[in-house]
Image: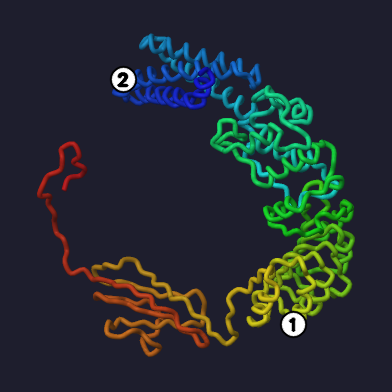
Amino acid sequence: MTDFFSHLHPLLVHLPIGILLAAFVLEAMARWMGQVQLRPAVQLMIGLGLTAAVLSAGTGWLLGRGGGYDQELLTKHQYWGFGTVAIFGILWWYKSGKLYLPLLVGGTLALVVTGHFGGGLTHGEAYLFESESVDNQSVEPSAFSISPETKIFAGLIQPIFESKCVSCHRPEKKKGKLLLTDEAGIRTGGEHGNVLTPGLPDSSLLMKKIYLPKEHDDHMPPAGKPQLTELEIKLLAWWIESGADFQSTLKDQPLPESISSLMAKNSGVSDNPVFLKNVAPANSGDIQKLRSLGAHIQQISVDQPWLSVSFAGNQNLQPAHWEALRTLKQQIVDIDFSHVNLEKFSFDNVEFPHLVKLNLSNTSASPQLARMLKKSNYLEHLNITNTRADQSLLDVLPTLTHLRKLFIWQTGIQPETFENWKKQFPNLKIYAGAYIPDDAPMTLRPPKLKYGRSFFDDTAHVELDFPFKGVEIYYTLDEAASPTTQSSRYQGTIVLDQTSHIRAFAAKKGWTNSSLVDAVFVKKKLAIRNASLATPPSPKYPAKGA
């Protein structure tokens, strides 16, 4: 029964905060804004807030007796909480006088301090200044973030604990006397004993609590907290089944195929073996040299050698750029050459053996494109949008066993060709855009009508506008017929002196005429001289009269 009442504290703790802060605001309005009619509500809210504060303090005291919290921070929270109750208790009894306002201000400040220490118990002492709570960090491992040298516990298991568990199992809040921030705490276990049984994940207390239904009181993480993903659960179970070793690497214990596939699926990366290769990190001097030549270089993952390089938009590539690139060919997995002039360079001797992603959109690389692709056995993502390609690409595709995405919009490849590719390579997604024949005319957008008012007294001035030159605009005021190229051609401002309906369209040789744009303009014939109200307004709200 004690546990039941103690667990009511998180439910009750927000009531006194909201009610008593509202009482302070209403008192400020009554005192400094002349809203004296609010005073009875202030007393009522202080009474309700005091009641809620007593219940919150009592259940909080019971919760604190259960342990699992930083004792120093818990003591501060409790003392300030009891002090807040005492101040508002005196305030409830001392309804007026010189001490009323100091007591109200002091009680409100004490309430804020109490809430601050409570937040520290729940989220850590530095919760106000953390840019992102550990509860919300995503640590899904991916094929980019691991290698044979990755330590299983430090690289795969500990990030799961940090993301989903340490908010309740850290030195400041050791729930159930269990610490999951380091090896020593995990080996020691908690108040119910060891949480790991090496070799037997189903017998380990840690996994038992994770496997419980989410609505179960003992399920971990508790309801309302970020839950473990399927991948995270499988990783924990595999680690325990493998012996729960804290020092072994993926070279010692490779991931099973089921976990590797799930990891690749979740990270958007296919089961590409290139990321499991043991490649030495790039020389920092070589990276700096390429950066000095205008390349944007980014390391894809911390403690991993893989690099992403971009020359996007650079129209002045020189042989020095290629030489600098070759020094990093083992580490480069992503290259962006979009909108780069590559006419001066030959791809005959260019080789990036670990390339996964290549962007050649809006370039002129097609003559040697097939030769370069033949040397890119691990390529997954190829973009040759608006780059003239020929049928030699068809001969290369069967060799690219890891290719998953191909962007070929506006490449000159005919629709029937890539439709055949889709049938031949079912795992390949081809993005070809909408096919528009070269002789298909484009449709103009409608012209824009510009005017002040559609109701006018004397005359209305109307203009027609189009965003580029060489386009003719035709219009008509005749209700009996739609405008054609034989109608009036717009040459300047149209002045209307009577009710009219304008309809217009844009036309240009070699283009399809735009759709119609229209507007009705009404000349006012009646003028309102005066007005009176049949029923006079309330004397309380006369405004400016009728």
The quadrant holding residue 159 is: top right
Q: Nearer the viewer, residue 292 or 462?
A: 292
Percent x, y of residue 319: 87, 69
* Residue 345 shows in the view: no
Say which residue label 1 marks.
391
Furthest toward the bottom, the residue is 486
Rendered residue at 49%/85% (across/down): 508
Percent x, y of residue 267: 69, 53
Q: Nearer the viewer, residue 501 or 378?
A: 378
Rendered residue at 74%/82% (across/down): 391
Q: Secondary structure at mark 2?
A: helix
* Residue 46 shows in the view: yes
Q: Secondary structure at mark 1?
A: loop
Say which residue label 2 marks.
40
As measured in the structure, the alpha-carbon distance from the residue carrying label 1 to the one carrying label 2 is: 86 Å
How many circles with numbers are drawn on the protein? 2
The quadrant holding residue 541 is: top left
251 shown above or below 216: below
The quadrant holding residue 234 is: top right
- Tag 1: amino acid: Gln
Label 1: how many Cα within 10 Å (few below 14, some 14–19, many 20+): few
- Tag 2: amino acid: Pro
Label 2: how many Cα within 10 Å (few below 14, some 14–19, many 20+): few
Percent x, y of residue 349: 89, 72
Rendered residue at 71%/79% (across/down): 388
87 shown above or below 479: above
- Label 1 vs 2, first from the N-terminus: 2
